[in-house]
Image (spheres, grey):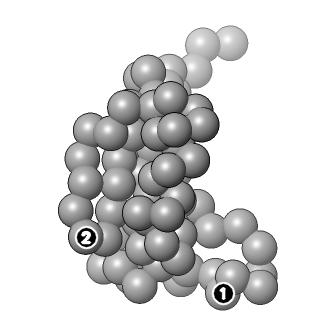
Amino acid sequence: MDTLLQNLGAITLFVADPQRAKAFYRDILGLRVVHEDDDAVAFDFGNTVINLIKVSEAHDLIAQGVVADRAAGSRVQLTV
């Protein structure tokens, strides 16, 4: 069966401290930074962008959705 979904454009992870998390993605995984500001860092991951966005900025990004509390488990958004 053919599917309309051929790839994932972006994976957005809501993190407490994007600058601290940046070190892992850049230094350990070797990903290249493609965007950075005070509240976010984005990395090139082939055909996908990995966004690390400060939790406090998530509301503006997902508007009607709710970002789970840290104790609730994973906090992620997939952009198709």
Q: Which amino acid does label 2 sit on?
A: Asp
Q: Which amino acid does label 1 sit on?
A: Asp
**Residue displayed at 53% across by 69% down:** 15
Q: Is residue 72 left or right of residue 45?
A: right
**Comes first in the chain, label 1 or label 2:** 2
* 1 or 21: nearer the viewer: 21
Q: How crowded is mark 2: few (under 14 residues within 10 Å), some or many (20 or more)?
A: few
* 66 or 38: nearer the viewer: 38
Q: Element under label 1?
A: loop
Pointers 1 and 2 in contact (CB under 8 A)?
A: no
Residue hosting label 1: 69
> For residue 49, what is the image quadrant?
top left
- Count every numbered label the image shows and give the total: 2
* Residue 68 on image: x %, y %: 64, 82
Q: Element under label 2?
A: loop
Residue hosting label 2: 38
* Residue 56 on image: x %, y %: 41, 85
